[in-house]
Structure formats: structure tokens, C-alpha cells
Image (spheres, rainbow, N blue to C red):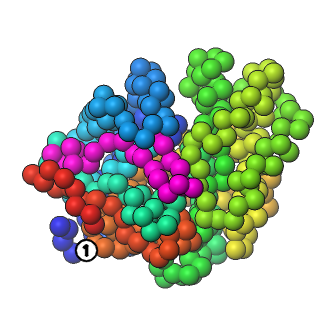
Amino acid sequence: MLGKGSVWALGAMSGTSLDGVDAALLRTDGERIEGFGESGYRAYTPGERDVLRGALGQWQAAPAVCELIETAHAELLSRFPDAEVIGFHGQTLAHDPAQRRTFQAGDGAVLAEVLTRPVIWDFRSADMDLGGQGAPLAPFYHFALAKYLGAEAPVAFLNLGGVGNLTWVDPAKARPQDDGAVMAFDTGPANAPIDDLMLARRGQPRDDFGALAAQGRVADGVLEAFLDHPYFFKMPPKSLDRNDFTDLQARVSDLSDADAAATLTACAAVAVAKGLEHLPSPPSRIILCGGGRHNATLRDMIAAGVDCPVETAEDHDLDGDMIEAQAFAFLAVRVARGLPTSSPATTGVRASVSGGQISVPGQAVGQTA
């Protein structure tokens, strides 16, 4: 499907924060990063976010929900005519790794017809069929980023979306699927509980820059009870659904808005510190990406709880808003070329696997890659 050498791949990501769709062009051969192209963003309207919130937890989306997701993606992705292949993640509505099932709404075959280019999608199912948790999927791209940055010592990438996920990379290894090259797992809730609090109490989508949390106090006892959750005692790899910690809202229900925001922000930060205990060795630095890196209060709380520098993607001339979209561009090329997209150290899959469906224009259904 793709010629030899590097290609311009376009990746799309719509995360559990439900803010909108990111898209980014990446020049890659599926193993190395050779350049970054243009990127774009298509926000969900308040009405669209309400529809998506109402669909969370569903294992079969209504046609109107799928149409919303496909339309939003098509509007954005059509702005990138130079893309030779497209990686489409879809919108996660439900994820239950314990039962080996996951659901991302949106049909890549529909997008292939609309965009008249190959679309690679359904990245998680093959991993779960082989015993993996289907998440996280960005770690192999994080490995390529560490190589691109010229890292010489182990480094960790921390994506702060609705859920936090951490990738530890040893750049001395040759390939991401090699033993000891990566370790990845979800740390715990990140933006999702804070966003839900802000929407419920103030009608706002987020705590911009952590300004409200900065005015509050962390409530006594909540962090200790939070860390008693069984998830924190599991060894990686492990992953979460956006709504796995919904009890957090009840724990802060009697607090002021500022104290509740501060406490939920502290929970996200302490989950990261707890996660570092599982790593093979301490990272030389943590590089933050995802929307949560804009939350200065969260950044400061994370930095206070770890023993290494905490930096942002922008400190390394990367676009921290687009790393996950770039990751799915990278994974699309790997799927097209039969390269692994996950491994036992990233998802718990029994063996390294290349997971995804390939849909091309004129082909009604995707074919398993």
C-alpha cells in the first residue's frame, strides 16, 4: 500500500477529555521520525460534547453519535491533502481491560471513502485478542521520540489527558519491542475528574492553568483514601477507563470549589509519583504532553513529588498538544508495514503484535492488518 522509505502520515486523536479532535502530519518510515508537518484542531461544540458525554460507557453507539465523530474528523482531516495515509483512533466510549473489551466509535472505512485515502483504524482490538489491555498505544512513538531527541539515559513521557499515562524509555535499545526498551501504563485519573468538577459546579470545561486549584487547600485524608484503590497495587502493564474513579467526586462533594479542585489535582499528581515506583530505573527527566501540561498547579504538584526534572514537550521543541495525534500517524505506517504496535511491556499482550484495520477507498469494509 505504501512505497518504500518515509511518507507523510496524518494522525487523528480525540481523547477522553472530549474537547475536540487533534490532527498532525508526521514524516516517518514507521521506525524513525524524519520530520513534523502541519497540525490542526477541531473543537467539539458544547452540544457535541453533551452528546459524547451521554454516550460514555456505551458499548454500541447510536448512528447519530458515530456520524458526529466521523463528520468532525472528516472536516479536520480534509484540510491535509498531502497525507498519504491516515491513522484514525476514533472516540473511546468504553474501555474494560479486565474483560478484554474496548470500544472506539467511528468507522475508518467511512473516512476512507470521504477522504479518498487509506485509513488505518481499530488499533486496539488485535492487542486485546492476544490478551493485551489495548492501551496505552503511544509508547512505541515515545520510543521514537526519545531517539529523535538524542536521549542517552532513560526518559519518561507523561501524557496528561482525561487519564494520565506514563511511558519509560531506554534509548539504548534498538527497537521498541526489544526486552527492556519500554514500560508503559496508566498512572490514574488526570484531567477528567477536574474537568467534571468544573463543568458541574461552574459550567466551565476545565480549570484553566490550574487557577482555581491554586486558591484551594488539599483536603485531609482524601489522598490516603485515593491511594488505597486496588489499581495502585497492580503491577504494570495496566490501563484505566475514564470513569474508573468516579467516586472522587463524592469524596470532594462537601468541599469548596477551590479546595475540591486542589484535592483532585493533588490526586492526579500523587498517582504519577506512585507510578514511578514501578519503573525499572528512575528516569533522567519527565517530559509532559497532553492538555494537562497547561495546568501550572498540576505541573508544580507533580514536580514536588518526584526526584527528577519535570519538563514540557515545548522545552524540547515538540508540540505537546499533538504528540498523541502524531503517535497514530506513526502507528498507521507501522501497521501498513507489518511492524509491531504494542508489546508485553506496554499492554500485557502475549507477544508483540501489529494491530489495526486497513480501509481503502472503494472497499466497503476494512481488512485486518
Which residue is the site of mark 1?
Answer: 5
Q: What residue type is labelled 1?
A: Gly
Tell me the magenta residue range: 93-113
User: Looking at this rendering, what residue extends furthest in the right direction?
Assistant: 220
Please state, as top left, top right, bottom left or bottom right, where the C terminus lies in the image: bottom left
- Residue reaching furthest front? 99
Relative to 80, residue 70 above or below: above
- Name the residue rendered at 50%, 65% in the picture: 132
The answer to which quarter of the image holds residue 129 is bottom left
Q: Which residue is drawn at 66% across and 59% down?
A: 286
- Report if residue 105 lies within the magenta region: yes
* Crowd rating for badge 1 (residues with CA inside 10 Å; few <14, some 14–19, many 20+): few
Residue 239 on image: x %, y %: 58, 55
Residue 296 coordinates in the image, percent (x, y) = 69, 39
Question: Residue 190, position in %: x, y?
Answer: 64, 43
Q: Which of 228 and 280 is in front in this view?
A: 228
SS at mark 1 in the image: loop
Q: Position of residue 111 (x, y in %)?
A: 22, 44
Q: In which quarter of the image is residue 293?
A: top right
